[in-house]
Amino acid sequence: MPNNTPGTPPPVLYCPILDNDNLLSIEIGGLSERELYTTYEAAKATGEQILVLYIQTERMLADGKIFWYKTPNGTWLTRYIEPKYFHLGKP
């Protein structure tokens, strides 16, 4: 992930997905290399017909998941998010 800064994300991030993505597949297999946003509204604003996943980053960090990168535009990236760390909607 070039040109990104390693760091510690806020306790919660949000991931937009298209509502026609296979949600069951994501719930089973997790998320790979997605752009994550600091607010629900920012994630929702990425397009029409967007669903937003609530990412429990604080819990991920507590479990030792440390591969976080902040992009120049203020979004966050990580290589993989296990299904146990996210759910649909706001907290």
Image: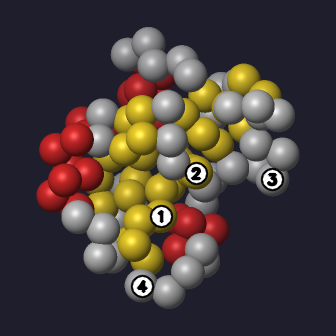
| Residue tagged 1 | 16
The alpha-carbon separation of the residues under discs 4 and 2 comes to 17 Å
Task: Name which of mark 4 and mark 1 comes first in the sequence.
Answer: 1
Q: Nearer the viewer, residue 9 or 27?
A: 27
Q: Give amino acid for label 4.
A: Gln
The spot of residue 67 in percent (x, y) is 56, 22
The spot of residue 63 in percent (x, y) is 38, 16
In the rendered structure, the answer to whether residue 72 lies left or right of residue 70 reads: right
Q: Nearer the viewer, residue 50 or 64?
A: 50
Image quarter in which the N terminus is found: top right
Residue 63 vs 58, above or below: the answer is above
| Mark 3 closeness class: few <14, some 14–19, many ≥20 residues within 10 Å | few
| Residue tagged 4 | 49
The spot of residue 27 in percent (x, y) is 20, 49
Look at 61% across and 28% down and name the residue there. 68
Query: Which element is circle 4 on?
Result: loop
The alpha-carbon separation of the residues under discs 3 and 4 comes to 23 Å
Q: Give amino acid for label 2.
A: Glu
| Residue tagged 2 | 35
Task: Name which of mark 3 and mark 4 comes first in the sequence.
Answer: 4
The alpha-carbon separation of the residues under discs 3 and 1 comes to 16 Å
Task: Name which of mark 3 and mark 2 comes first in the sequence.
Answer: 2
Q: Nearer the viewer, residue 25 or 37?
A: 25
| Residue tagged 3 | 73
Task: Name which of mark 3 and mark 1 comes first in the sequence.
Answer: 1
Residue extending farthest to the front is: 2
Q: Give amino acid for label 3.
A: Asn
Q: Are marks 3 and 2 in contact (CB under 8 Å)?
A: no
Look at 35% across and 65% down and name the residue there. 89
